C-alpha cells in the first residue's frame, strides 16, 4: 500500500462522508442545488475509487473503502445527526465491520 493510495483512500472517504451528509440534509430539506451537490460529490468519490481500483485491485480497494465508510458514516450519523440504532442493528454493524476486515486482511494473514 503506497502513501499515494492511502491519501486517495482518505480523500474518497472524506468526499463520500460529505456526500452522505449532503444526502441526509437533502432528505430533510430537499431542493435542486442540494441534489446537484449530492450527485457531484458521489461522482467525485467514484472517480477517486476508480484510481484506487487501478492501484489496489477491485476487491481490496472496495473492501477497504466499504469498511472505512461504514465506520465513518455511522460515526457522523450518530454524533452529528443524532441517529440511533437498536442493539441488534449495532451488532449487525459490528459484524459487518469484522466481515469486511477479515475479507480485506485475510490474504495477508493466511498462507497462500
Image: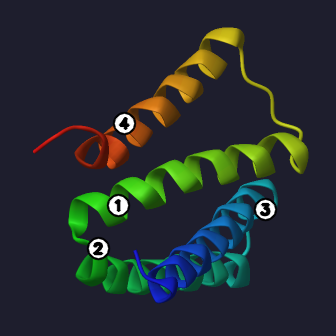
Residue at the extreme top: 88
Crowd rating for badge 3 (residues with CA inside 10 Å; few <14, some 14–19, many 20+): some
Point out residue 14 in the picture as x, y percentages from the top left corner.
67, 73
CA separation in Å, label 1 and label 2: 9 Å
* Residue 92 image label: none
**Label 2's element?**
helix
In this rendering, the label closer to the viewer, 4 or 3: 4
Q: Is residue 31 above or below residue 60?
A: below
Residue at image mark 4: 102
CA separation in Å, label 4 and label 2: 17 Å
Q: Tell me what residue is drawn at x 40 percent, y 86 percent.
A: 47
Q: Tell me what residue is drawn at x 34 percent, y 48 percent.
A: 104
Q: Earlier in the sequence, mark 4 or mark 2?
A: 2
Q: Earlier in the sequence, mark 4 or mark 3?
A: 3
Residue at image mark 3: 25
The answer to whether the residues at label 2 and label 3 have Cβ atoms under 8 Å apart is no
Residue at image mark 1: 62
Q: Earlier in the sequence, mark 4 or mark 1?
A: 1
Residue at image mark 2: 56
Location of the N terminus (image quadrant): bottom left
The answer to whether residue 80 is left or right of residue 107 is right
CA separation in Å, label 4 and label 3: 33 Å
**Label 4's element?**
helix
The answer to whether residue 68 is left or right of residue 28 is left
Q: Is residue 21 above or below residue 81?
A: below
Amino acid at each position: 500500500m503506497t502513501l499515494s493510495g492511502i491519501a486517495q483512500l482518505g480523500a474518497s472517504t472524506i468526499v463520500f462522508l460529505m456526500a452522505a451528509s449532503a444526502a441526509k440534509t437533502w432528505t430533510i430539506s430537499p431542493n435542486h442545488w442540494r441534489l446537484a451537490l449530492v450527485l457531484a460529490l458521489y461522482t467525485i468519490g467514484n472517480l477517486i475509487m476508480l484510481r484506487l481500483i487501478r492501484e489496489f485491485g477491485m476487491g481490496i480497494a472496495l473492501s477497504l473503502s466499504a469498511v472505512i465508510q461504514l465506520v465513518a458514516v455511522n460515526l457522523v450519523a450518530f454524533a452529528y445527526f443524532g441517529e440511533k440504532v437498536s442493539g441488534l442493528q449495532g451488532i449487525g454493524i459490528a459484524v459487518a465491520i469484522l466481515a469486511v476486515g477479515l475479507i480485506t486482511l485475510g490474504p495477508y494473514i493466511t498462507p497462500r
